[in-house]
Amino acid sequence: MKFTISSSALYSRLTAASKVIASKNSMPILDCFLFNLRDNRLTVTASDSEKYFITGMDLIDLTDEAMFCVPARTIMESIKELAEQPINFEYINDTHELLGFHQSGSFSIMTKDAEPFPLQQDINPEATMLKMSAETLVNGINRTIFATATDEIRLVMTGIYIDIRPDHIIFAGTDGRKLVRNIVHTVQPGFEGGLILPKKVATIIKAVLAKNETDVVINFDSEKAIIQTPDFELHFRLIEGRYPNYNAVIPTNNPFWGTVDRAALIGALKRIGVFCNQSSSLMKVHLENNLMKLSGQDNDFATSAEENLYCEYNNAPISVGFSCQFMLEIATVLEDAQLTLELADPSRPGVIVPAEQPEGEEILMLLMPMMLNE
């Protein structure tokens, strides 16, 4: 059996599919791509037994049908440095050998039988469908993934919650110390529901999904989901459980607020962070007379620093303790030139929002306060 394919098209698809393959697999067959050749098309499947990435591409030529497994690292390294050109492959069924021929040479790879490769389970035919643009999904992930939990004590908080309302959707993420709520009014599903996107799945989507792609379709039931685009399908298990009521911790009445330049704030936080206690990252934020004063100290090393930033603030003086590291993460993720910090009192969470919200969206970041040593 012989087939011909573009080297760049093959490598780009294999690179995307390889994001699913685990560094250590319980089954050796999962170190391979599953190649399925039929109807003048190559379909590639990669899996870690929980997630399945399926992508395909048209062939230049195909003489017969075949299905076999190719070691992922070997095939990718074989074509990685090739310039764009057709590659002619020949699969020898008797010996399970895959021969590759290109303009400057050839290579030979021993394949494996496709039968042991586990296949994805079909989703419930009555699954719920959610449709949105690729840009909406990527932006939602980028703005929330940093706020998700890293430990698995509360598994639901390790993922991104997509809260579905009839006239909008909400991307939410929290680890109990910081929280993100991104409301998107441009998506109007017409029903209520929700799903928790595992962090690993969100990371893969970030890596492989281009913002300029067309619509993304998410089909999901109570246990599984499929994300579909014109280029790939990603099958995975959802995180099961009830996501915490994130709206309950967001203070609604914040009389103290100040607006500051985002770039200046990021620079100041990076400098202050060097002098904060490395375990707590505690920093004092003081607002008074159009001034935001940031100060940090590490008593263990007898070091301290202070930064003064111009801030539009004309209310009573207020001081709050925050994690410098977490505030830097929030300021880095937000994109507007100006950020507004809203406060109620030193014991309640601080709310950080862009001074000008993106069209059709509402972005809110919340940061839990820390006790100041005063």
Image (cartoon, rainbow, N blue to C red):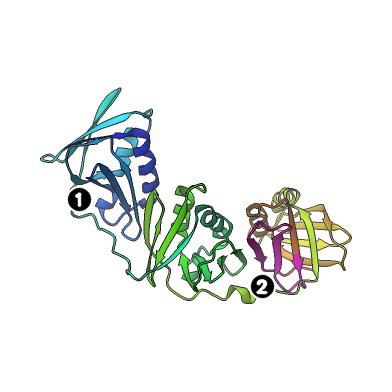
Label whose residue precedes the other's in the sequence (2 or 1): 1
Looking at the rendering, the stretch of residues picked out in magenta corresponds to 342-370
Q: Residue at x 67, y 68 (%)?
A: 368
Which label number is shown at residue 250? 2
Q: Quadrant of residue 144?
A: bottom right
Quadrant placement of the C terminus: bottom right
Q: Residue at x 39, y 72 (%)?
A: 222
From the top left corner, tell me how far across and down residue 49 is, in percent: 31, 59
- 263 left or right of 232? right
Task: Tell me which amino acid carries mark 2.
Answer: Ile
Task: Tell me which amino acid carries mark 1.
Answer: Ala
Task: Check disc 1 and report its element: helix, strand or loop.
Answer: loop
Mark 2 nearby-residue class (10 Å; few <14, some 14–19, many ≥20)? some
From the top left corner, tell me how far across and down residue 325 is, in percent: 65, 57
149 or 88, nearer to the observer = 88
Task: Check disc 2 and report its element: helix, strand or loop.
Answer: loop
Q: Quadrant of residue 70?
A: top left
Q: Furthest-left residue in view?
A: 94
Quadrant placement of the N terminus: top left
- 236 left or right of 170? left
Q: Which residue is mark 1?
A: 114
Q: Is residue 272 magenta?
A: no
Question: In the rendered image of this protein, does residue 11 appear above or below residue 243?
Answer: above
Q: Residue at x 51, y 70 (%)?
A: 190
How far is mark 2 from mark 1, CA to CA? Answer: 52 Å
Question: In the rendered image of this protein, does residue 210 appear above or below residue 253?
Answer: above
